[in-house]
Amino acid sequence: MRRYVIKRLGQAVGVLWAAYTVSFLVLDYLPGDPVTAMASAGMDSGQVDPQQIAALRHEYGFDKPVLVQYAEYLGRAVRGDFGDSVSTGRPVTSALADALPQTLQLTGAALLLAVVLGGALAVLATYTAQRWLRQLLLSLPPLGVSVPTFWVGLLLVETFSFRLHWFPAFGNDGFKGLVLPALTLAVPTGAQIAQVLAKSLLTALDQAYVETARAKGAGRWRVHLRHALRNAALPALTVVGLLVGQLIAGSVVVETVFSRDGLGRVTAAAVTAQDIPLVQGVVVFGALIFVMTNLVIDLVYPLFDPRLVVASGRKAALA
Amino acid sequence: MSQSLVDDPVEAALGLGRPIGAGPQPYPGRRVDVRRLLRFVLRRPGLLLSVVVLVLVVLASFWPDLFTSQDPLKGVPSQNFRGPSGSHWFGTDELGRDVFSRVVHGAQLSLKATLIAVLVAFVAGGLLGVVAGFVGRWVDDVLMRFVDVLLSIPALFLSLALVTALGYGTVKVAVAVGIASVAAFARVARAEVLRVRQAVFVEASHASGARWYAVLVRHVLPNAAGPVIVLATLDFGSSILAVSALSFLGYGAPPPAPEWGTLISDGRNYLANAWWLTALPGLAIAATVLATNRIARALDGEWNRQP
Amino acid sequence: MTDERDNGEDVTTPLLEIRGLSVSYRARGGTITAVRGVDLDVWPGQVTAVVGESGSGKSTTAHAITRLLSANGRIEAGTVRFGRHDLATLSEAELRTVRGARIGLVPQDPTVSLNPVKRIGDQVAEVLLIHGLATRRSAPAETVAVLDRAGLPDAAVRARQYPHELSGGMRQRALIAIAIAAQPELIIADEPTSALDVTVQRVILDHLQRLTEVSGTAVLLVTHDLQVAAERAQRLVVMSQGKVVEAGPTGDILADPQNDYTRRLLASATSLTTARPRTPASIPKAKTAPLVEVRNLVKEFTLPRTGDGPRTLRAVDDVSLTLHRGQTLALVGESGSGKSTTARLVLRLTDASAGHILFDGTDVTTAKGARARQLRRRAQLVYQNPYASLDPRFSIGEVITEPLRAFKIGNRASRLARARELLDRVALSAAALERRPAELSGGQRQRVAIARALALSPDLVVCDEPVSALDVSVQSQVLDLLTELQTDLGVAYLFISHDLAVVRQIAHQVAVMRAGRVVETGPPEELFTRPRHEYTRELLAAIPGGRVPTPTAERPRAEDHIA
């Protein structure tokens, strides 16, 4: 088991490094002249002083060959130093660290809502014998994935804030301020969870072991929850891991719509300002969250599925 | 020999090899029978509606004058903030421009962007996946590692990074969105190629003396294409959403271009008193995406029903 | 038959009485009636076998008894009297008290019928817990007892394991345990052994039979195999196309079948085990050089590493064979014997680890590229699964002419003509050229596969279990075709099968394989009458019925009590 963990950790580090490299390629190599971009970011365009450009170039090391730059940057990044944000001057890492808690709160709440609502919908839709109810429930997820998140957010604000005054329209205060944003963010993810879970539940219900269970005299709920769901939850669990990245990214839009502070707002501002170090930090951070979440899921998965070969050799799956 | 060879108990009951189809069998051959297709679509109102919506969107992007004669870029300032009415179906915005006309003219921008995005993803991702799946071994490992990395970066972040690097504009946004979708296409294409490659009839073809390229082109690609095409249709919808999100955030074409996302972003400022500025363009987006998703589901269903 | 048994149970009325049962399925085109007006009786303490080919409705009937049909199935009419109730009209809740407790089901496929994420013990215990026959605390001990009764060795250890850690035979015993746990009065066994190897089949069926004798449970055995039914059942019900065509005591039916269909079924079943092989008159001339010669062939597979280091599996272990022109060499063995791998090595579909393969005098052991293709020109393959070996998107014409196109033989017109000729050879109409595989039946598709194999006029055709996936009546047709083709075209066959009875009809020489080695070779008659190796004897003994189906299950009860 330990070898498996170490192997996965190694893979995770590898992916992170590769993500860093990709972000480097895109942001530092691609634009050709990031310096002019950065230099003109803080001021009106067209007013760039060539001396200033040369100075910036030297400071950021852009006058050195690409590979050397890369090695230097990578060295610094590994030590947690992503440089300083061009627009605010503060270190990137502290800018991210400050913005993180708010976003984690938002994404956490959204994930919880998505799993609970999406899961409940899938279970109900596949359990009910009433065709009309099943059709109705199953028509909701496609709706959920088809609507733009920012539009949903705005509509919710329009209805529940401006018309009904139940919730605040913007800001970060407290629980009430979390409801609408979390709901908005949860819609597409919850819809996808519902779709995947419903599909795997239907597949599970078709399997021969369900017939065996029914032949034992098991009641419908027992068959549905203890047999079908138990098996169907596994692919759904994998999907949740993949969707975490979507949730983090979605915070960009949702925080903008609801004027909340957080990682999303910081990112949007960074892109507008063409603040390359900050954007790079955000990209690598996004990858970090994704990798960590999936690592946890990968390690936890064998607990749920005994068929997996754990590479210690002690447990082996027979064909 | 675990499964009963004829899975469908109905077919087994008949003891026939002929599958039970609805209505008379189509003419033999691979050409799609138009009449059967029409009948299929007409029997499903949701699908019919989706096709109609999509046709309308396509028409609007090529010939906007079919739908509206009003100017999307210049408005009558005195007529601003009018709600939806007979003369202005979607109302007017802060500069008195007709919102419906802006939405119609925006269709072209959205369609162009989406096509570019899907094309980029389909070609790049499909190529990656086919090569990885067909060649296998170390090539597969290397390519899939690369794809895994792309997948680990949240799509929107990747697009934002590309926008930061490349700059603003409809085409640049489209390419950014396309590149973010490459990973999904690569994954699906590879999975399908692997699945078909292991099929018995592929080995049979090989055993009959066919060379590898003949096997690839005649057997593997046609049988693997289905799910990839379904994904392309789905990607159409998700690309529209991604493109409009990026233009909502302000990275699309500069004003006064009537990109749908930009329209909503503009309307946001007046949410309290002019709800139609955000609600209706968003409805256009939602309707288009719903339509493409519905069509994708139909394609997926039909593909799964193939023998 | 005595009227009363020691425990005073009444055996004059049937335990299960089905009258006029009709079951239909809702399909896209309409409703299909799978079962029409079926009458069936099952007597306590007896084994009743329902025999029929695929599509006969036997499985549907069995499942309809406890209303375990799929979602689109419905009981249209009829009564299912079990004890004092009509199961067809009971409410779902009441039916659930019958399922598992009074009627047990042993399903067909042990690989998929167990919940993969639950332990064996938990799955057996579930039956007891649902019907209140054990508490959470007493369940584990009772479970082990039940698994023991079902014949699972090391029951306590197995109970803690998951399904994937058990072999097929053990899983099936676990399923039997689930069926008998609550000591039901009736067990419905739906093809309980068709997914298992022949030697394991015998063990399982023995066990089921013993359970009947010991506990007096009635068994309804659904099977497509007449031999099995004849050996194990006291009563026989023959079904075809949803109807019961004949029913009665096994001995009576076998001795004097009344119905045409029964007679036909009997004929095709017996033809596989009667001592009349149909080999052509030509006897191999020892002087001519063999077409295929295999010397000391070895194929090793490396297995995933375990804690103890790398492991290899010798799928083919020092095998030597000879095949002459126009002859048939059969490779017989159970799953894992290496017979299929050997054939694939001969065709160069995989690389040998050691040894030599000679085709018509030329060493082709390491042939690659163009040389391998030369081999393909003269040696072709017919696969086991007719549903998977044809590209579903090709038309039949394209399937058959593909080898011709691959070697650029002729032009469009000549290829089409050849395809027609081949279709005619395999007794299919030329209209099939335009059809797609999905429109043909299994037997027809296999004929197309044979036609494709013959397109290049090869010297050798390897047949990998070509009839195992087909119904019995279709099997003999395809075997007849293969024999005929050999006589007409002089093609040699390397015939792979797990079924000695099938092989008997068609082979000149038989090689019995086990665990990668050839244990015995010889002409089939010799092997059948004077087997020398113990494994061959075991294999022969495992064929249900041996030669002609005889009712061996009908022994008077009194005999059991004689010391």
Image (cartoon, coloured by chain):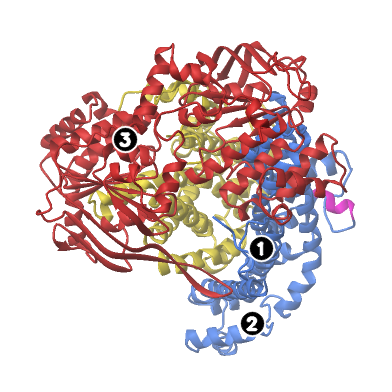
Tell which chain the image draws in red. C
x then y, percent, for residue A43: 64, 74
Query: Label 3 is found on which chain of the structure?
Result: C
Q: Which residue is mark 1?
A: A298
Q: Amino acid at mark 3?
A: Gln
- Labels 3 & 2 near each other (Cβ < 8 A): no
Tell which chain the image draws in blue. A
Residue stretch rendered in magenta on the structure: A175-180
Q: Nearer the viewer, mark 2 or mark 1?
A: 1
Q: Amino acid at mark 2?
A: Ala
Tell which of C34 and B68 is nearer to you: C34
Q: CA distance from mark 3 to mark 1?
A: 44 Å
Tell which chain the image draws in yellow. B
Q: Residues within 10 Å of mark 1 (few under 14, many from 20)?
A: some
x then y, percent, for residue B73: 56, 44
Q: Amino acid at mark 1?
A: Asp
Count of numbered tags: 3
x then y, percent, for residue A178: 84, 53
Q: CA distance from mark 3 to mark 2?
A: 63 Å
Would you say residue A271 is visible in this rendering?
yes
Q: Nearer the viewer, mark 3 or mark 2?
A: 3
